[in-house]
Amino acid sequence: MTAPLASTLPPLERNLPRGRTLGWLAALAVALVGLPLVLPGYQVSIAAQILIFSVLAMSIDVLAGFAGRTPLCHGAIFGASTYVVIYWTTTLGGSLWAGALLGILAATALAALFALLAIRTSGVYFLLLTLALGMIVWGVCLRWTSVTGGENGLRGAGRPAFLADHVSFYYAVLAVVAPVTFAIWRFVHSPFGMTLRGIRDSESRMRALGYNVPLHLFLAFTISGAFAGVAGALYAVFNDFVSPSTVQLSQSVAGLLMAITGGIGTLLGAFVGAACIILLENVVSLFTARWPTVLGLAFILIMIFAPEGIVGRARLALARRR
Amino acid sequence: MDRRSFLKATALTAAGTFPMPGLVRAQGAPIRIGLLAPLTGVVAAGGREIVDGFSLFWDERGRQVGGSKVELIVEDDASNPDTALQKARRLVEQSKVDMLFGNLLANTGLAVANYVKTNGTPYFIPVIAADDLTQRARIRNVIRAGGYSASQFSRPLADWALKQGYRKVAMIAQDYAFGHEQCGGFAQTFTEGGGKVVGQFWHPLNTSDFSPYLGQVGSLGADVVFAMETGADSTRLLQQYASFGLKEQLPLLGAQNATDQSVIRTMGPECEGVITAAHFAEGADLPATQAFVKTYSGKFGKIPSLYAFSHYVGAMWVAKAIEAIGGKVEDRPLFLDTVLKTDLPDSPLGKPVHFDAYGNPVYDVFIRKVVKNKDGKYWNVPIATYPQVSQFWHYDPETFMKQPPYSRDFQGIKKA
């Protein structure tokens, strides 16, 4: 498996007139802002969770979709930020703001470290190396009982009063996720992002053209880690609890599956993917204890009928109609 | 009217028709109980028995208590604390349950306990044994109905071991909080009574090969071994202990999980004779215990395990309290106080039980031995009883809680 996960999709800008794109974005913004007015409390918390995981899935998409490197350690980077935030606010009694900042910094530093080790590889070796790096984080969280609480994890101090109810928390998350999404969008559409796509499509050609490939990959990895850290910090406030299951492999896999379901290389597909998986988890488990089976079947169907992901598929269909 | 204000108005009208959570329950409305059990994941077998034991009680009662119908909502926590938390949120916020029950793994229980701390939903934990939930980090609405704290039963076992003349113990345990706490209880009581801990071995969960530990245990000069194991680890340890030939040389004591039915019902003579301590012994010659074992075995084809009986007892305990207040579970302070004041004289445990001031039960603790019953199955039979053992043993609660919680580094071992 040396081919990158991303298929070469027609870029969105070329398909839609700019005015229509803006129109869709405005409609989406209104829908997101209006959501808490129509949903009962519990569903609002699910919506907030979807937003948080969308950021994680987008951070994975930066690497998987644009740089052609599929990582399996972003769950660990995400969780490391969650650990730092909760450790800072409970054990050390610090403020949430400083905690969130430290969490994101920790995630960025961890991602930089992982990047140094991982960027020299690609394809399946990159996948396995990042998997192993993520497992180290999990192992440390499990065994360093005096700091991480071991298997039992760390309990948070509770959300600050102004974020206590689901609706205000949802708006707070939205207020963070919206600019972060814009930042990631700008990032992958910048000249730097174009270079990443070039590396994805032909590393040797980019090298021949004089681009510093390792440096580009290192920066992309580190920055994507920072975004995963933002998601992790939000998750700390959302969940108010962290244990090794937050940094374990299944978290990285879940993030990757969200990105794939939505469509690798589509960026905003992350929102669709996160929504699909989290909603499926929550709705299906109402009816059957075999919900992981249903989830598995859904993935198989997506892989067969829409390997480009939901958004990718829709985009292709749109392009064909024109 | 523009769209935004229309939505707002509609939402407000819709919200108005929903009952506010936990405030008023309509007369005659059912009492809703949320049960969280690991139906998938590493401890799924135990989770199944949680549901069996818990539903058995309510089915026997015709799903009625204190004049109200009882509605059970079972959710899978997937043996994962994040999922447990999510499901607990859903049960409380969407299904509007009046109380939560269950969970098996300590980390799932601790996550849910932290969540109910903020909203006051009564949460009963018949299996979650983390000491601090009813000690240093007590939460008022978290009550261990039918459950026990981890170090509670290993202390009487240590006392019993001293009385048998054992003086040097080697300990082998799973390396996580539950293991640290059970071993801590044993080590502290054993050393304060003049015994010595000659070695402690912590191994990761899911250890398949115990030979590195068992080899050392044999050469330490111990006169008794204490093993704190659960699930498949316990099966493997008991088997390997026997095949190393240690079974004939060194008597083996264990935490209650080591010889729980969930472990020994599939085992042969290698589990015979192991001594453990618990609040329940399925082989006890007590009418209430035998009646329960007979009903449960008849229905599910196996002798009840810790997970099944403790949820049965927990349900029974809380049901008695609900009856005492005529089904008014929405008055949470009254409900919680009543549960804490309720004694249970006639449960399958066979001995009367009551709560201490911290929400943890005080039990008659059996020292149990694994023997073969007349049907050829292995089960635990009491050989000694310690009446009225609290989670604080003989210590004063206030003084006791000043010492740090048990961990790998602090085992309460008295310096000789």
Image (cartoon, rainbow, N blue to C red):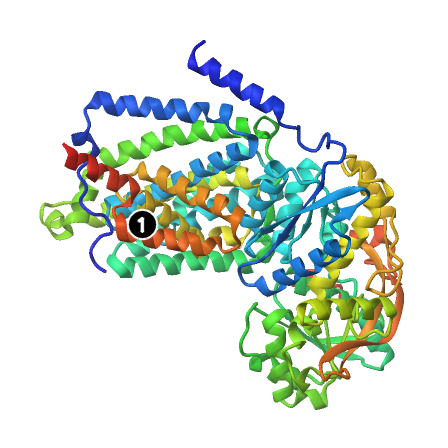
In the rendered view, tell whether residue B57 sits above or below residue A267. Answer: below
Measured from the top left, where is residue B180 in percent x and y?
A: 67, 64
Q: How many labels does the image show?
A: 1
Left or right of residue A195, residue A295 in this image:
right
Disc 1: which residue: A302
Q: Nearer the viewer, residue B182 or A30?
A: A30
Image point 41% across, 45% down: which residue?
A277
Q: Which residue lies furthest to the top in this view?
A: B1
Q: Can residue B219 be seen in this view?
A: no
Q: Is residue B393 visible?
A: yes
In the rendered view, tell whether residue B275 sits above or below residue A294. Answer: below
Q: Mark 1 lies on which chain?
A: A
Measured from the top left, where is residue A36 in percent x and y?
A: 50, 26
In the rendered view, tell whether residue A161 sits above or below residue A67. Answer: above
Mark 1 crowd level (few <14, some 14–19, many ≥20, 10 Å Cα): some
Q: Which of A110 and A76 is in front in this view?
A: A76
Q: Which residue lies furthest to the front in this view?
A: B62
Measured from the top left, where is residue A141 in percent x and y?
A: 52, 55
Look at the numbered disc 1 and give the secondary structure of its residue.
helix
Amino acid type at mark 1: Ile
Left or right of residue B12, residue A195 in this image:
left
Measured from the top left, where is residue A181 in percent x and y?
A: 35, 32
Instruction: Please identify the quadrant where the N terminus of chain A is shown.
Output: bottom left
Q: Quadrant of residue B96?
A: top right
Left or right of residue A313, residue B269 in this image:
right
Image point 25% across, 38% down: which residue?
A314
Instruction: Please identify the quadrant where the C terminus of chain A is shown.
Output: top left
Image point 29% across, 57% down: which residue?
A126
Q: Nearer the viewer, residue B83 or B64?
A: B64
